[in-house]
Structures are given as C-alpha cells and as structure tokens.
Amino acid sequence: MDFPCVSADKTHHVFEGMPIYDARFSEVREYCLPGIAAVCDESGAYHIDFFGKPLYTERYEAVGDFSDSTAWVKDAGGYFYIDENGSRINSETYTYAADFCDRTAAVYHAFCGATHITTAGEMLYNDWYYDVRSFEDGTALVRDDEGWHRINKGGEILSAAEAPEDDLPKGSIRIPPRQNRIAELLAGRTYDSAVILIRHAEREPFYRGEPGVGKLVTVRGEKTAAAFGAQLPGIDAAYASPMPRCMRTAELIAGFSPQEDSMLGEPSAFIFDNAKSSAFYLTTSTATAVRSYIKGAELPGHYPIAEGAARLLSHLKSAGTSGLTLCVTHDLFSASFIGAVTGYDFAADWVDFMDGCVLLRNGDEWRLVWREGEVILP
C-alpha cells in the first residue's frame, strides 16, 4: 500500500501530488501504519489520521511515531506511551522513552533505572540497568556495574559488548533486584501456623491484546522458585491459581503438586465476572488498574477491594490452620490484598515475581508480615 508523502514545505501530506486534506501544520512527519502521522502546530504536538483529523484532544511538547499501535509522547512531566485512542498504556512516566520496535521499547525511569517494556506497558524481563538500547534482531545492549552486555528478550546475558557510540542518555541509577525476604521473615519466629502468599515466578512477558492464560514460567523463574523452596522449612500444604505458571511455581517451591484453588486465580476472591475482568485487562495494565483499585475505584467484574480482601483473608485463614501453607497467586491479587490490608499504594514500585507476604497465627491472633512492616489482622 502506497502512503501519502510529506509535502515539499513539510506542512501537509500529498498523494500523487495532491493534498489529502485542507489543514496545514507547522511540520508533519511521514505516515506510519495503520495510517497515523505525527504533526505539530501552534497548539503543540499530536497525531492525525488520513483525513488530517487529530486522534485525540491532548497536545504535547513532542511525540514519537506510532509503531506496534503505540507511540511515546512528552509533556512537562516526562515521557509516557499512548495507544491509537490517545489513552496511556500504563501509569508510568519516564525520563526518556524510545519508539517501539518488535513490540518492545527502551525506557529510563527516574527512580529505578533503565529497562525494556512491552506494548502492554510491563517490563519485558525483571531487571533494571543503568543504560539500555533498543532491541535489534532479538538482542539489545544493556549496562550494569560490570559494563555493557548483550541480552536476549528473556533477559539472559549473552556476551560482553562494547559501549555504543551515540548521544542517548547515560544513566546513573539502577535498582538492584529486590531480594525475596520471606524465608528471612519466617526464620526465628514462633507461630502456631503460617501462610505464605506470593506472586508466581518470572513468566513470559505479556503484550497488549494477548490473553495471559498461556504464559509459562521462564527458565530463570524455575531456577528461582526451586532455590526459594530450598530456603524454607517444609511446606505442609500448597495451593495455587489454576493457571500453569502458578501451579508450576508452587510445585517447584513445595516439592509436590499443589491443589488448584480458584480463589487465588480464576475467578478469585476479588473477581465475580471473569469475562468482564479478562476483557478489561486486555486493554489496561494490571499495575495501572490495581493502583486505582486500591484507592477505591470500581473495576469491571471486580468486588469492591475491601470486600475482595476480606474474602481472600477468610480463605487464607481457613487454608492455614496448621503447619506452613503455600499459596501462589498473581500480582493482581497479591497487590490488591496487600494494598487493602496495609494501605500501601504501590505508586512507586510493584510486586516482584515471587514477592509477597506472610500470615502468622499465634492462638487466635493473625498478623500480616510484609517487607519491613506488620499488621494485626481482623
């Protein structure tokens, strides 16, 4: 398909020498599939369709070209990504953002470092670096404390690499991988029974519009889950969301097959209409949704968050009447539960793979222990 071209004075687009719309702009760029062009005028920068009509009402300091139905835009707060409707693909704002290529983009975050994200607005792999460059032919350059490396899309380091010769950002911030503290939280404590509630191990990345049911645990995730299980005292009972990645994580940690538990997955303690919620998460990132959910927003197919948290708490107490019980779920449910119980809003971070909390019972008293804090449970 032949696309219209930029006019000689760069103020509009022409096809076979004729303007395709009446509007004129300060500057226009080439059309990108499926027929969107970046333009600017006295009101700011934005995107138009083939008829010269704006895709949305917002105006920005600068905008990128659409690729994979996604483009970066920049306002006074920084860079973020929008879809073809002008809606943000996630709630994150970056200090730098590159164009998407092969459904991934290089980004720099003010507090975390640099990484790659997918068109779903989530991290491609579970690592931050000082610097990253865009993927080409399935590999990308990244810089950590040891220097520059080449990685694949699974986040695996393939080889050392030379520093790129370009004028892109040079980062000075990198959050190291957060250590799972659950074994430490259990060690030295006395309890009548305990329940571990965690997110599953690292899984294959999501891309926008893809269902999540078939995503499996990665090779790195399997190794991490097995190593975590070796640090724990013996697991007496194990439950998991029916999704394969949760079942596999629980099996590797516990050393035996877990029991499927729909309260931890589908439809779960928080969701009463799985069809509505599944459709919602095809177009909305989990982190964006849960951050608003914790603040009281109503989500399609979801119970109010306080009700969902109470349902899950009751279920966990019933499952953990004796010994050490393992419950493996998803970030949606672990973040919602922890946020509802502790008040933590996850505005500046997120639940890592295999991050979670511990519920400890002494007599009739239950406590939730998470990271550096404890909460007495009702």
Image (tube, rainbow, N blue to C red):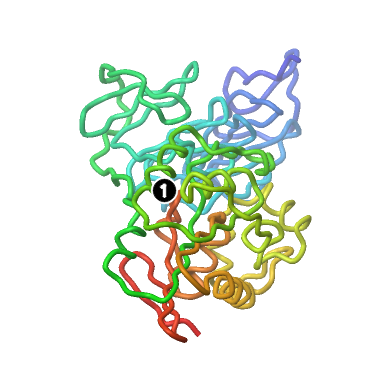
Query: In the figure, 348 relative to 372: above or below?
Result: above
Q: Report crowding for label 1: few under 14, some 14 to 19, many 20 or more residues within 10 A (C-alpha).
A: some
Residue at x 63% of width, y 20% of height: 7
Give the image location of residue 149, x and y in percent: 30, 23
Nearer to me, 197 or 20: 197
Kindly state the secondary structure of the residue where label 1 is placed.
Answer: strand
- Closer to the camera in the image, 261 or 82: 261
Q: Position of residue 262 (x, y in %)?
A: 68, 59
Relative horizontal placement of residue 188, taking residue 13 as reference (left or right) = left
Task: Give the residue drawn at x 66%, y 64%.
Answer: 263
Name the quarter where the N terminus is drawn. top right
Where 29 sits versus 254, above or below? above
Q: Residue furthest left?
A: 146
Residue drawn where x is 66% and y is 55% of the image: 260
Q: Position of residue 62 (x, y in %)?
A: 48, 40
Task: Give the image location of residue 41, x and y in percent.
Answer: 56, 40
Q: Which residue is mark 1?
A: 78
Question: What amino acid type is highlighted by mark number 1?
Answer: Gly
Position of 274 with respect to 175 (left or right) is right
Q: Nearer the viewer, residue 368 or 42?
A: 368
